[in-house]
Image: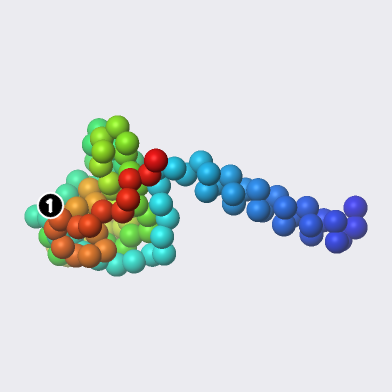
C-alpha cells in the first residue's frame, strides 16, 4: 500500500468515525467549552444525565461551571448540562451532569432550552 493510499484510507476512516459519532449521539449536543455559574440555591451533580444517577457532589449558587455538553433525557423530558463545577466554599472541582435550569449559559433561571431532539 502506498503512502497516498494509506493517507486516503486514514481520512476515510476518520470521516466514517466522525459521521458515525454524530449519528449515534442523538441525545447529546456538544458545544465549545463555555463558562457560567450555578443559578439555583443548590444542584446535585450526577455521574450521568438522569435523575436516578449517582450523585457525585453538590454545587451551590454562584459556584463557577465550565461546561462542554448538553444532554436531553427523553424519558424524563429533561435537559442536563455537563461540566466541571468549582465550589467557592472549598475550591473542590466536581465533574458531572446537572439540571440545565441551574447551570445554563444565560446565567438566568429559567433558561431558554435547546430544541428537543427528534
Q: Is residue 109 above or below residue 43?
A: below
Tell me the residue that label 1 is attached to: 42
| Residue at (30% x, 32% y) in the render | 75
Where disc 1 sits, the SS reads: strand
**Residue 70 visible, this orientation:** yes
Q: Quadrant of residue 50?
A: top left
Of the pair 118 and 69, the residue shown nearer to us: 118
| Residue at (25% x, 42% y) in the render | 78
Coordinates of residue 115 in the picture (x, y in percent) = 32, 50
Q: Quadrant of residue 49?
A: top left
Q: Is residue 2 left or right of residue 30?
A: right
**Callout 1: 10 Å neighbours few (<14), some, many (20+)?**
some
Coordinates of residue 10 in the picture (x, y in percent) = 74, 55
What's the coloring here?
Answer: rainbow
| Residue at (41% x, 64% y) in the render | 32
**Residue 53 visible, this orientation:** no
| Image quarter in which the C terminus is found | top left
Of the pair 97 and 8, the residue shown nearer to us: 8
Residue lying furthest right: 2
Residue lying furthest left: 41
Report the label total.
1
Amino acid at each position: 500500500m502506498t503512502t497516498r493510499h494509506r493517507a486516503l484510507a486514514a481520512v476515510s476512516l476518520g470521516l466514517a468515525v466522525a459521521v458515525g459519532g454524530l449519528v449515534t449521539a442523538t441525545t447529546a449536543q456538544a458545544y465549545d467549552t463555555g463558562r457560567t455559574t450555578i443559578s439555583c440555591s443548590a444542584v446535585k451533580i450526577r455521574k450521568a444525565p438522569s435523575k436516578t444517577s449517582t450523585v457525585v457532589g453538590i454545587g451551590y449558587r454562584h459556584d463557577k461551571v465550565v461546561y462542554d455538553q448538553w444532554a436531553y433525557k427523553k424519558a424524563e423530558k429533561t435537559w442536563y448540562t455537563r461540566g466541571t463545577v468549582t465550589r467557592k466554599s472549598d475550591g473542590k472541582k466536581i465533574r458531572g451532569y446537572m439540571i440545565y435550569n441551574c447551570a445554563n449559559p444565560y446565567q438566568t433561571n429559567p433558561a431558554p432550552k435547546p430544541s428537543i431532539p427528534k
